[in-house]
Amino acid sequence: MRLDLRGVTVNLDGRPIVHEAGLRVDDGEFVALVGPNGCGKSTLLRTIYRALRPSAGLISVDGDDVHRLPWRESARRTAVVAQETPAELDFTVWEIVLMGRTPYERDAADGERCARALDRVGLAGAQDRVYATLSGGEKQRALIARALVQEPRLLLLDEPTSNLDIRHQLEILHLVRELGVATLAVLHDLNQAAAFCDRLYVMSSGRILAGGPPGEVLTPELISQVYGVRAVQRTQLVFERLKDEAEP
Ligand SMILES: Nc1ncnc2c1ncn2[C@@H]1O[C@H](COP(=O)(O)OP(=O)(O)OP(=O)(O)O)[C@@H](O)[C@H]1O
């Protein structure tokens, strides 16, 4: 699997929001997209998952222009956990997760897939809850479970940890890493991006300014240029996920 963006420009309301963006995600890579509020990260992600069309440039998955693929084929290749959660409908968590199987024929193993995904995101006991009654963090984890049952080759995540407490943030980031599925994630926490991703791209005012391994890209100079803050490396409180007792 390979996601490739070349010269992608997106205009909204006649205003250029993304300018000639280029990036790639290779098979099994976890790539982060970071940058200040309003720089165009979500717009770029929405263009990759076809909620928007680029006014110029090409977005391809495995060599195919995503905007020309049949929708069902697109949905088999790419799963999305977007910022905007579905409307407050009366669906149960189970029904929401099962929606991830929509691009496929119904299959006897669907129940098992949903149960496994709910277990992986720590919502095993919540399958019969009404989605609208979940907390923000539980909703987010349910949507991640829905993306997992879609068995995508490419996972697109827009601030997947924004509603989660620190333990669930780490669990989700570990989970995504361990999936080994090519992932492009918009993240705000630079420390977490640096800790979890293989490479990252920094966006500013609609342009991709830099890309590469976090240690090479996240220099104090670049951070000051992009965010207008001084980055100082200090000994800091480091959060690590506690291993479950059952784990080796
Ligand atoms: N539908 C739209 N019509 C017009 N302008 C829009 C639309 N959607 C977003 N914008 C504008 O495009 C710019 C980029 O927004 P976008 O949501 O992509 O930024 P972002 O980097 O994801 O920000 P954040 O970190 O705050 O989520 C912003 O100035 C925003 O106001």
Image (tube, rainbow, N blue to C red):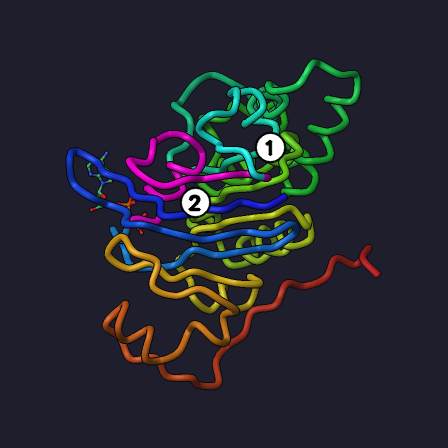
Which residue in the structure is indicated by mark 1? 77
Identity, as a three-letter code, of the amino acid under mark 2 = Asp
Element at label 1:
helix
Given residues 80 and 174, the one toward you in this image is 80
Residue found at x 49% / y 38%: 81
Q: Indicate the quadrant where residue 92 lies.
A: top right
Element at label 2:
strand
Given residues 84 and 194, the one toward you in this image is 194
Disc 1 from disc 2: Cα separation: 17 Å
Q: Position of residue 245 (x, y in %)?
A: 79, 59
Apparent side of residue 13 relative to residue 230 in the rendered image (left or right): left
The C terminus sits in image quarter:
bottom right
Q: In this picture, is 214 found above or below 53?
A: below
Disc 2 under 8 Å from ligand 1? The reply is yes
The N terminus sits in image quarter:
top right
Identity, as a three-letter code, of the amino acid under mark 1 = Arg
Which disc, if any, is residue 158?
2
Check if residue 150 falls in the magenta segment: no
The residue range painted magenta reads 40-62
Q: Indicate the quadrant where residue 42 lies.
A: top left
Residue found at x 72% / y 30%: 115
Residue found at x 41% / y 32%: 85
Q: Residue furthest left?
A: 14
Q: Position of residue 44 (x, y in %)?
A: 36, 44
Ligand number 1: quarter of image: top left
Q: Position of residue 244 (x, y in %)?
A: 74, 57
Disc 2: CA contacts within 10 A as few (<14), some (14-19) or many (>=20): many
Q: Earlier in the sequence, mark 1 or mark 2?
A: 1
Apparent side of residue 229 relative to residue 216 in the rendered image (left or right): left
